[in-house]
Amino acid sequence: MLPTQSSDFPAWYGEVVRRAGLAENTAVRGAMAIKPYGYAIWEAIQRELDQRIKATGHENIYLPLFVPVSMLAREGELVEGFAPEIAVVTEAGGRRLEEPLAVRPTSEAVIWATYARWLNSYRDLPLLYNQWANAVRWELRPRLFLRTSEFLWQEGHTAHETEQEAVAEALTILHDVYADTIENVLAIPVLRGRKSESERFPGAVETYTLEALMRDGKALQVATSHYLGQGFARAFDVRYTARDGSEQHPYATSWGATTRLVGGIVMAHGDDRGLRLPPRVAPQQVVIVPIVRDDDRTVVLEAASALADELRVSGTRVRVDDRPEHRPGFKFNEWELKGAPLRVELGARDLAAAAVTTVRRDTGEKQQIPMAGAADAVRELLADVQATLLQDGREERAQRTLRDPAGYHELIAYLREARGFAEAPWCGGSECEARVKADSSATIRSLPLEDGPGSGVCICCGRPAVTEAAWAQAY
Amino acid sequence: MLPTQSSDFPAWYGEVVRRAGLAENTAVRGAMAIKPYGYAIWEAIQRELDQRIKATGHENIYLPLFVPVSMLAREGELVEGFAPEIAVVTEAGGRRLEEPLAVRPTSEAVIWATYARWLNSYRDLPLLYNQWANAVRWELRPRLFLRTSEFLWQEGHTAHETEQEAVAEALTILHDVYADTIENVLAIPVLRGRKSESERFPGAVETYTLEALMRDGKALQVATSHYLGQGFARAFDVRYTARDGSEQHPYATSWGATTRLVGGIVMAHGDDRGLRLPPRVAPQQVVIVPIVRDDDRTVVLEAASALADELRVSGTRVRVDDRPEHRPGFKFNEWELKGAPLRVELGARDLAAAAVTTVRRDTGEKQQIPMAGAADAVRELLADVQATLLQDGREERAQRTLRDPAGYHELIAYLREARGFAEAPWCGGSECEARVKADSSATIRSLPLEDGPGSGVCICCGRPAVTEAAWAQAY
C-alpha cells in the first residue's frame, strides 16, 4: 500500500516515484537514475518545449560542460550565487589541471564568453539560442526530480539591441513557451509573475516565474525566465557596432526548465492510488487489459491487438498488457499507480456486445463504448481527461488561495499550515518579506507582472502597499 | 579562399568546420562549442538514430554523469583502458569529496551497478536501454568533432539470457541502427566488420565496427557495437534467477555513436568549395536565392516566398535567403560552402518563363524546371542528390581499395600514402599487425564479420592466413 497524501506527502511522493518506475537514487549523492517510464515523460516534455522554442525563432546549440573557474568568476553575482553548489574538476588526463574547471551550474558565463566572439554588428542581433544539457548543483537535501545534484534541462540565452526587446523576449518565453506547455500539455495551471529582489536569479534585473500549486498546498517554481540587463555583456566585454556606429553592450535574457517538471506532474495530479498522467505526456495513453479465460484467450487477445492497431493508427499511444503471469486486478492497480489516463478492459462479454469497457484514471468513471468507432471515442475521452485535469487544478488552486486575509495572523496561520497561496498587499520592503518567512517558512512566490496602483496597506507593517504579493511555502 | 583538399586536408577540414558555422574551439582545451548549423545536423542524426533504436525495442533512460572512482575500477580492463583520459571531480559544494568522482568516459560501470538493482528474474530480460548524453575523455590532440574532450553521443547497454541473443543484439544494432542510418541517411558507405584484439573496446569479447573512407584516403570509425560477454555482470555481481531456478550472470552488449559523425559527413562528402550535405541531414535542403532588380523586388520576393511555402507543405526544409545586404554571387558561394543540397534561383526571367532555376550542390548541374509541379520536381532532385552522394562514395571506395596487393611492399607503400583501404590475407598474429603499423602507420580497421576458410598466406609473414583484413590509416 502507498502512504496516503494526507498522512505523509513526502513519503507518498517518494514511493510513487519509485514504484511507478520514474527514477531512483544512485551511489552518487543527489544524482538520480531516470528510469524508462520517467524518461519517456521527460521526452514528451522536451518535444513540446523544443517545438515552441523553435517556433519562437530560437536555434539549438551546445556549449561545454566545463567552465574555467576564472571565467565563472567574471560576473560577481553569478559566482556568489552558485559558489556553494559547484563541483570542481581538478585532475584530468592523469595530471593536475593548471586551472580548475567548474562543472556548469548554468551556462551564462560560457555563453557570454562565446557571444564575445559571435557578436560584431547590430545585424547579428538578436542572438536567439537554446541548449539541451545536463547541469550540476551540489544539493545537501536532494529529492528525486525536485532537487538533484545533476539535472537535465534546456537553457536559453539571448542577446538584443534594446532593453524593451529583451524584456519582451523574456515574457514571450514565459507565456508562449513555458506557460503554454505547462498548462496545455502538463495540465498544471500556473501563476505568472515576477520574483521579489531576494528571490531573483543571481545577476538578473528581473526574474519572471511560473508557480504551481502542489496537492500538499506547497508551491513549486516550475520555470523561470530572466531579464539580465547589460551585466553579463559588461562582465564579458561583449560589444557590437550599433546602427549609429557607436559601440554598445547588448541586453540579455536567460531561461530554463528542468526535469523538476516531472516531479511537478507527480505532485500536481497524483492521488492516493498513484500518478495521474495528463494524456499529452503519458508514455501510454491507453492500456488495454484483456480479460481472458482458458477457452477464449485467442479470440480476446486478437481483438485486443486489433483494437490497439486501430488506436495507434489514430495517433494514440497504446499498450496491450497481455502478461500471462498477472491477473487483471493486479494490472488495474499497476496502471493506476503508473497513471495511464485510460484503461480499456476487453473480455468475452465485451466482445459479445461488440463493445469495450473504458475506465478513466482521473475520475474513475467506467463506461462501455461500442467497438465501432472506438478510436474516435477514445480520442475524445483522452481530450476530456486532459481538460479535466487542468480544470481540477484550476478549481483546487482557487479553493486553496486565500485572498486578502483579515490580518497578519490569518496570513501566517494559513501559510504555516501550507494551505495554499495567500495573496495580500505588500509594502515592497525586505524586512516584511523576511518577517513572514521567519514566522511561517513561506516566501513570496510571485508579484504581478504589471504593478497596479498600490492599494491598501501592507499586511505586515501597515504602511502603504506598492503591490499585491502571492505567498506560499515552496519546494 | 579555402585551402584545397589535396594541398592540406586537415587545414581544409578545420576551415570548412569553422566557416560553415559547424563548431569552434573554446577556452577549455578540446571542448568545442557546437554552433546552430552544426547542431541542426546533429539533431537530424539523433532523430534518425533514436527512431531506429526505439523501433528495435529499446527505451531511453538517463544515468548520472559522475561515477565514483571505485565503481569505475571494478572492471579492470575498462578502467585500465580509460584511466589516461579521465577527468576527476575532487571538490563539490565547497568541500573536498571523500571519494573522487570520475566524469563518465562511458557508462558501463554505472549501468551495471544499476542493473544489479533492476535485474532479478529471467522474466526481466532482456534489458534494452539507451541514453543520450555527454561524455568526457581527455584528449591530448583534439580535433573538432573527431576527437574532443567532451562529446555528445548515445550509448546503448543491454543484458540478455544467452550469448547467442547478446551477439545477435550487437549485430542488429550494427546493421539496422548504425549502418542503415549512416548509409541511407548520412549517405556514407560503410565497411562492416570486427576489430582485431588490439583494437577492441576495453572489456569487450568482440567489437563490431563500421569503417568509412574519408576523401583523404583515411578511414574513420563511425560507430561500434560491442559484445561484452559476462565480464561486466561478474564484475558488478549482476545475477538473476534463471528458468531452471539457478543463479546466472546475464550476457551484455554496449554500443555508441557520437558527434564524430558530423565530422564524418564533412570529410566523406566535402569538396574544395566546402560541405556537401546529404539532403536527409541538411538543415536547409533547399535555399531559394531571389535575383532582384530595383523594379521587380516585390514580385520576385513574393514568388520566392510562395514557392517556399509550397515546398514546406510538401515536407521540404527550405530557406529564402533574402538578405538585402548581400549579392546573389555571395549567397551562392556561402550556400555552397554550407553544403545546401539544392539552390533555387528565382528572378524576373524565370518568372516570365513560369519556371525556376535549380543548381545541385553535388554535381553542380543547373536546370530550369517549370514552376508548376516544382515541389515534386524538387523532391525528386533531392532524392537523387541523396542517392548520388552514396553512389559516389561507393565508387570512390571501390577505386581506393587495394585488393590482394602483390606483396608486403606494395601494401606498405599504399597504406603509407593513405590511398585508401587495403585488403589482404592475415595470419591473425599481433606481431604482423604491429609490424604493418610500424612500417605504415596503418591499422587493421576491420575483419570480416564471418571468418571464411582462411585462404592464401599472410601478406606479412607468409604463414597460412586465417582471415582477410582491411587496413588503412585512421582518424
Image (cartoon, coloured by chain):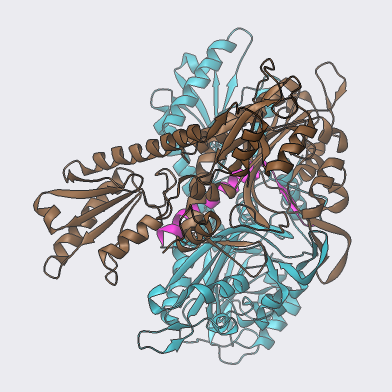
Chain colours: A cyan, B brown
* Residue A437 screen position, x and y as percent: 72, 78
Is B345 on the left-hand or right-hand side of A181?
left
Residue lying farthest bottom?
A463
Front position in the image: A365 or A373: A373
Residue at the far right: name it.
B98
Q: Work out whether B290 lies above or below A25.
A: below
The quarter of the rendered structure image containing the C terminus of chain A is bottom right
Where is residue B84, by image quadrant?
bottom right
Establish if B408 lies above or below B371: above
Quadrant of the rendered image containing residue A414: bottom right
A35 within the magenta span: yes
Q: Residue at x 65, y 41 (%)?
A: B256
Q: Give the range drawn in magenta.
A: A29-56
Q: In this view, does B222 lie above or below A188?
A: above
Q: How many marks?
A: 0
Residue at the top extreme, as displayed: A295
Q: Residue at x 45, y 30 (%)?
A: A311
User: What x and y, as percent, mark residue A121?
Assistant: 41, 79
Q: Main secondary structure of the magenta part?
A: helix
Residue A157, percent from left and from top: 53, 69
Q: Which of A171 and B105 is in front in this view?
A: B105
Along the line of sight, the residue nearer the viewer: B232 or A407: B232
Q: Does the magenta stretch include residue A401?
A: no
Task: Give the quarter of the figure containing the N terminus of chain A.
Answer: top right
Image position, residue B281 (x, y; %)? 44, 46
